[in-house]
Structure formats: C-alpha cells, structure tokens
Image (cartoon, rainbow, N blue to C red):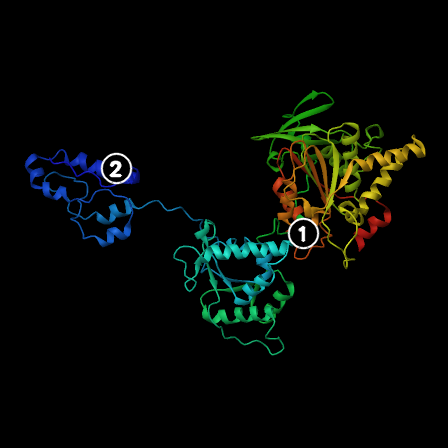
Amino acid sequence: MPLPPAPTKRAATLAREAYDVVAKSIKRTGTSRAPKAAANGSALQEKPQARSLEPVAELKREKPAPEAPKPIPSIDKPSEAPARNRNAALLQEPVPKRKAPKSIGPAKLFVLDTNVLMHDPMCLYRFEEHDIFLPMIVLEELDSNKKGMTEVARNARQTSRSLDALAGAKEADMGLGLKLDTTGHLEAGGKLFFQTQTLNYTLPISLPQGKADNQILGVVEALRPLHPGREVVLVSKDINMRVKARALGLAAEDYQSDKALDDGEFLYSGALALPADFWTKHGKTVESWQQGLYTFYRISGPIVPEMMVNQFVYFEAPGEPNLYARVTEIRAKTAVLKTLKDYNHLKHAVWGVTTRNREQNFAMNLLLDPEVDFVTLTGNAGTGKTLMALAAGLTQVLDERRYTEIIMTRATVSVGEDIGFLPGTEEEKMGPWMGALDDNLEVLAKTETSAGEWGRSATNELIRSRIKIKSMNFMRGRTFLNKYVIIDEAQNLTPKQMKTLITRAGPGTKIICMGNLQQIDTPYLTEGSSGLTFAVDKFKGWPHSGHIMLARGERSRLADFASEVL
C-alpha cells in the first residue's frame, strides 16, 4: 500500500498524541488486502497529517480535507465517522492549568483605593479570579506620590511600572479589560479595568464632591447598577474610608493579602507545653542517651506532628521532675529533644546577667547557640529582650571572639511629633533613637564590681568601641561578615524592609530581631501585617532559626502592672 506523505513540519513541533494517532492508523491499515488498499490509495494520500498547532487559525482558513476514518474495527466494513475535530484537539498545545477558583458564584469587582496600591505594589495580582477596577482619581494620586525616596514613593513607582506592563501587553484593550496573567502572574485570573468614561452617581450633599475619597466612593456607587449580577467591593487601608462606604450602603473591605496572620493570637510562640500525661503515654517508647553535658530523648506519638525544629518543649507537674528541652530533629513520626543549659543559675551568668523565668532561659539558649543564625524575640515592654541580646552579644564578641562587632539599628518611627532634623554624623543622628542601648549598657556595666571605677570606665570604652550604630536608610547593598546584628523595634518594619535587612547577612553573621507587636507606630501597619510577624511565620521550623515569645515582665512591678491595666 502507498505510504502516507512525510510531515511538512519539524518533528520537534509534533505533539505526542499525534505520533500515536498516525502509528495506530498505519498499523491497522497495513493488514488490509492489496486491492482494498489500492482502491483507497487516493484517499490515504489526502488524509490530514499530524501538524503543529501553529495554528488553529490556519486550520480554520484551509479548505476542509477528506475526513479521516476512525480505527477500523472490521476489514470489510470500515468506519466512516469523521475524526477531524478529535485530531485537531489532540494537536493543540497543552495549556498551563490555572488554579481552581476558591469562591463560588460570579467573580467580584474590587475597586482599589490608592493607599492599597502604595502599600503593596503587587496587590494587583492577589485577587485570584476576581476583577479589579481603578478609578481615574487613583491614577492621579499615584502620579502625585511617585516622587521622593520614601517607601511609599517607591511603591507608587513600582505600581506605575506594573500598570504600564499590563497596558503595553500584546492585544491589550482597556475597553475590554486587561488580563492580569499576561505578565506571568498565572495566579491572577481576573481582569483589570480602568475608568475610561464619566460615571454618573449621586452622593449626599454633605460630602464634598472634589475630595478624592468621595470621588472613589462615587465610582463604587456608579458601578453597582452597571454590574447587577456581581458584587462591587471597595478595598481600602483607610478605616474612615471603609466606615463612610458602609454608611452609604456600599460593600467595603480591608486589604487582607498583606497579613501573615488574620489574628495575632495565633502567632507562633516558640514553646510547647507537654501534656500532664506525657510520661504515661510516651514513657515506654522514649529513648534517651547522654552526649557531653546534654541529654537527648527520642520520642514518638501523636504529639510529634505538633512540634517544629528548634521549638522549645517543657513539662512541669507537681511532684515530678521538670523537663526543658528543644526539638533538634524531626523525622517521620519521631522527634529528638535536647536538654537546655540552665542560665538561671549564677554560675552560668552571661556578662553578669542571669535569666529570671522559663522563656528568658529559652531565649538565652537561642542567642548563644552558634548554629542558630536568626533569632526573633517578641514580648511586652520590660521582658528583657534588649538586655539579653546585648549581654549575649558582648559575651560572643569580647570573650569568645565569635563575632567581630555588634551592629545595632532600629526603625526611626516617632511615637509623637517629629522633633526635626538631628545634627552630627550617622551615629550621632541615631543616638536619640538608641536610648535603650545606653540604658542597658549602664545595667551591664554595673554587673562588673571587682574592677573598680577605672576598670569599669575602661570596660565601657571597650564595649562602645565594639558597638556600631547604623541607620536603616543606608543598609541596601551592604554585606555584614561575622557580625552580631541587633534590629530593635522590629514591629515597625514592613515585610519588604525586613527582607532588605535580613538579606544583608553574610557568612558568620547572626541577626536578632526584637519587638513588641502591641506598640506599632507605622501607619497602615497592623499586628498581622508587621514585618516581625512576617519573619516569625516564615522562619518557623527552619533548623537555623528560632523564636520565643517572652510573656513575663522583669523590669519592675510598676511596669508590669502598667502593661496589664493600661
């Protein structure tokens, strides 16, 4: 029988299914009788061959070719059913699968406020299958806030670049909406719509029509009758804006995608209390061995899935010995626990400082462990975060020579009104912000009582020569080698700023992030969206990081009572 004509396209462009279709057709027709094959020779010459999908438009333009038969079930009665549509489907290139929409019903239309775009320039791609609408006044506000070197100005410029990339994509049509996945963000399945025409709306007379917030509310009001089958929702970081929208009967939401946690109470604490019946249930299967000064336990059971690497576990029960350990390894359904060094005892004092409670002892074990590169400490005021970090740093810099120097920095966010520009060098400008450093150094200097006045003065000079105060504004592009970096008041950092600081770490550097999540002073930053919360949530379970939440204040009885009742 005559062979099928050779393919006109390169073999590399043929789909795998096309090879199978042609191979099966040749194998089955090869058993036909010679007269039958000769009679159908012309038909075989005109069968459509496997071709690249170049394209479906080309298949539509060309004249319809004779229909290809299905696999022949019988030699005498060949099937004449058409298979062109099936083969055309097989020739199509595989399309990347999109994530299934999480919501049920029609896609929502979200109207974004300007502060959302300036808070997170990637927010355009965080709404899954839903559509986004940008009023014209939002673009005007972006343009007016793009100048400067602040974080808000940088975000405004990044948002403008993203909008330009979407508008400049091939076959983009603003009237029909811009597909958000054209720039490679396949998780965004909706479209971006701009206000291309004047919208008619009516707002209460008490709202000034020229104010930008009220114009955005008017756009939301005008879109509702234009889209009766879907929900139109305003997304804003401004609380007053959301309150006004709800007062007008409009749906309004906060921007949630920037939050690492919906509720701060679910933040990883770094410690796990073992149940009272732990030894009863696990005592028979526990393996233990001694290695140097530490005791190791290998446990298994239902409590192992709740554990994470470098998480602290403790067992306290009346009449039974206490257990304080850290999870060093998790494999399948087993976990290895390592006992801790007791820094509550005076003989283990760190630069004259002893820990006063369980959580402080956990924190000191993390701060002095050379295998832990990143430590986060959270807690209320007076829990000893800065004092322990400084004491551990001085011990490892001056006594153990593990690091070359201590670098301290913090977010310069004022509690009240700004006092203006500060004179002097970088360290002199940072001096007023580093009052906590001076207070804690004064406490650490008093712990050395045997050296006398002259000795304490020399020690203070040595300590200050090994502590450098740096501003966060000049951190980008730097690399810290063998440094002990302390980031104070980290709750005021955004996730992007936190990433910038942590990525400065070079070989042999340890970074300590401390903060009180109940004292956030940065606008539009909440307990769930803080950079400190972001770091704690992302680093939990990493073998070279640790976190502990300090619960008990040790500053004074006045400070403890004030933190509880005020």
Distance from Cα at disc 1 to Cα at disc 2: 58 Å
Between 216 and 464, the one lying in front of the other is: 464
**Percent from the top left, x then y, of residue 224?**
49, 69
Q: Are marks 1 and 2 in contact (CB under 8 Å)?
A: no
Q: Residue at x 62, y 75 (%)?
A: 208
- Disc 1 crowd, CA 10 A, few/some/many (<14, 14-19, 20+): many
Residue 20 image label: 2
Q: Residue at x 86, y 50 (%)?
A: 558
Task: State the image quarter where residue 350 is shown.
Answer: top right
**Percent from the top left, x then y, of residue 4?**
16, 38
199 left or right, relative to 499: left
Residue at disc 1, secondary structure: loop
**Amino acid type, mark 1:** Glu
- Disc 2 crowd, CA 10 A, few/some/many (<14, 14-19, 20+): few
Task: Look at the image and tell me in which quarter the N terminus lies.
Answer: top left
278 left or right, relative to 226: right
User: Residue at the front extreme?
Assistant: 424
Q: Residue at x 43, y 52 (%)?
A: 182
Task: Residue under label 1, please give it.
Answer: 527
Quick check: can you spot residue 28? yes
- In the displayed structure, would residue 278 be above or below residue 49? above
150 left or right, relative to 231: right
User: Residue at the bottom extreme?
Assistant: 205
**Percent from the top left, x then y, of residue 59?**
24, 51
**Amino acid type, mark 2:** Asp
Mark 1 or mark 2: which comes first in sequence?
2
Residue at disc 2, secondary structure: helix
